[in-house]
Image (cartoon, coloured by chain):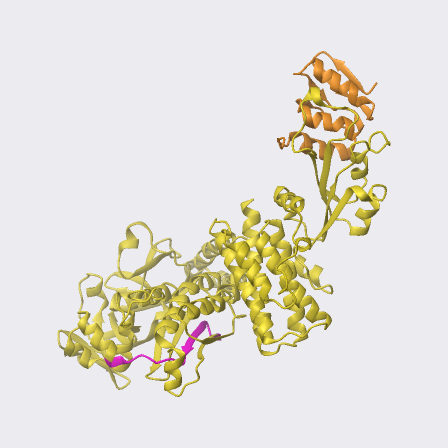
Amino acid sequence: MDEMLDQFLIEGRELVAQASDDFARLLRYPQDAAAIDSAFRAIHTLKGSVAIFALAPAERVLHAAEDVLERARKGSTRLDRETVTALVACLDAVDRWIDRIEAGGKLGGDADRSAAELVRLLPGNDADAPSEAEQPPEWLTSLMTREAATLSGASETLVAFRYVPDADCFFRGDDPFAIVAGIPDLITLAILPGGGGWPELQAIEPFTCFSVLEGVSAAALDQVKAAFRLVPDQVMLHPLAAPAEQDPDNGREKAAATLRVAAARVDALGERLSELIVAVNAFAPLAAQADRVDAALAASIRAAQVDLEQATSDLHRGVASVRLVPLAPTLRRLPRLVREIAASLQKQVEFSMAGEGLEVDKEIADGLFEPLLHLVRNALDHGIEAAERRQELGKPAVGRLALSAGREGDAVIVTLSDDGSGIDPARICEVAVARGLLSAEDAEALSESAALRLIFAPGFSTAGAVTDVSGRGVGMDAVLSAVERMRGHIDIDSRLGSGTRFRMRLPVNALTTRLLVVAVGTDRYGVALDQVVETVRIDSRSLMPVGEGLACVLRGRTVPVLSLAALLGLADVPAPATRLLVTRSGGERVALKVDGFAERIDALVRPPDGMLAAVRGVSGSTVTSDGGVLLVLNLPELAA
Amino acid sequence: MSVTVEGEVIRLSGRCGAEDAEALLAALHDGRNRAVDLSGLQRLHLAVLQILLAARPSIRGTPDSTFLAAHLNRLLSEKSDT
């Protein structure tokens, strides 16, 4: 049952996402035939899926929406913006109901009423809400519930039947059981007591039929009708929509070409692969050893090593690409949430999304939603002004919120921009000082971009009033830590009066991390390469004492220098040359002094657990080719 | 004879028609704890089946007919709706 529900939640969401894409297009081009067609198919299939779960209100709403689209498809009515808006409301409601089902709840008592309300808003349905005939008969609903487990696996169009034989049919020589046995492709069959309960033994009339036969066949409606040709008056038939209607042309190949695999299995494959990479690394010392005995043998070993490395790295790319999923399912709830949040704030917003087809590692896709939702809430609450205020300012009454995703090398860039009031760095500093986050002098010294980043400080809020949308503190610190957990970073760009843009940069592949191994004293640590801006070697004499610490000039800018040894509680050993690892922390460049740079490796970094989880600045650990454990440092956190 | 009683077991075999309903009902009536053996059953009329559904005796054996084998087990093991 749970597996089936999981499947429904996945597919249901995909269908909602598909339909909402189509509706978004229809809002702009209400006559787009391809979008009407695609929306119709998605809604139709979704209706079939909810029928299996006996979600009557959802089924009613989808049925009405399907009717509207069907008429538009046939050209008997034309879609307009108002109708598409009503369709969007229907889809939003179904989406909410799916959320409630996922949360383990029921649709709630108001679902029937809101379904009726939604249906009434659709053209052609305003006279009377759903008529009795449109609703699935009661027997069908209970059949679907009863047989849900069997029906979920079916992919074709099915026919449900209810056969109520006459009480005296045995006298006429009918055998209803034999008739039912003649139905082709019978999937399920139930025999139920006609009078509500089976009679007591002594009350049974052996020649009276007191049974009702219900079942589902995968055969065509005509074939099922044919099986009942002798008793048509005693039978009710009801075609069930196919749970997944495919493109007629290539649907079959598509269905066969896609495989759903539990993410954990792919992860396990990835871990095995890392072990293989580690094993291959053992060839290098082996070749070195062979060199001493036989140079030709050593050369052969090296050649074999290169081949193996090539093959493992191909395999690695293959496994990593299996984990790539489109961003769309993660983002598909946002348009609806934007509408809901904007409505609760009585603001008018036009939300647009671009690049949601981009594929990223599953971990990134999963981890992105929460921080993004925070940012969206924040933009709607604090960024975009109320319509009247916007008009006073000479802006269009409807605010704009745009989300875009794109690739930049090995990184995904996700940007959220609004045309709201922007963030005032002076005001941010004022609040931060008032909240005791920093001293007035320190605030004075901050650059504008550093001041903006104060909103990521824990417990920061600039809103005069605490609203129930963003709440206090807004959780912007949670945004930052979520992004850093994914080894990404976030930039803010804001212009007072004209808007704010958040830009998140995240790695495309999370499966393995490219690490730079650094030496601190006699210890070695891993550092994610995407946290490293550059590595430099300078003369120790060019380090300048600044306040209590050190700084140096890099590319014409003064950069604070911290000792990684000191940060890790180790002894700092002075040397004539200083090796610096430059990273970004809080939007500013910070240099960390290390004792040496070693190799770069691809490694699977395991998240910290046990005692490690409590250590600040450690993002995980990995196993090296010699079987040792390498701690992986989180530079921004250490340098903060 | 399609309905035969052997001690505490009622055996349904071959083709069980509507006329066998009475015999089954009587056999179940006489021995409430009798099990019903379906081995060798080729056909089962609804008149007989509905008595099994109402009486819910313990069932043993598998019918010869594939249709019956496929559906009877499930029909007779499901809980009564009453």
The residue sitting at the top extreme is: B7
> Is residue A93 visible in this depiction of the protein?
yes
The residue sitting at the front extreme is: A127
Nearer to the camera, B10 or A560: B10
Nearer to the camera, A125 or A592: A125
Q: Which residue is pictured at 69% across the width and 14% down the height?
A: B31
Left or right, A292 with reference to A211:
left
Whole-percent x and y of residue A437? 19, 70
Relative to A460, say whether A426 is above or below: below
Q: Which residue is pictured at 31% across the width and 79% down the height?
A: A423
> Where does the magenta region start and end?
A405-426
Colour chain A appears in: yellow
Left or right, A553 with reference to A396:
left
Q: Quadrant of residue A543?
A: bottom left
Relative to B46, say whether A95 is above or below: below
Q: Quadrant of residue B42?
A: top right
> Is residue A408 visible in this depiction of the protein?
no
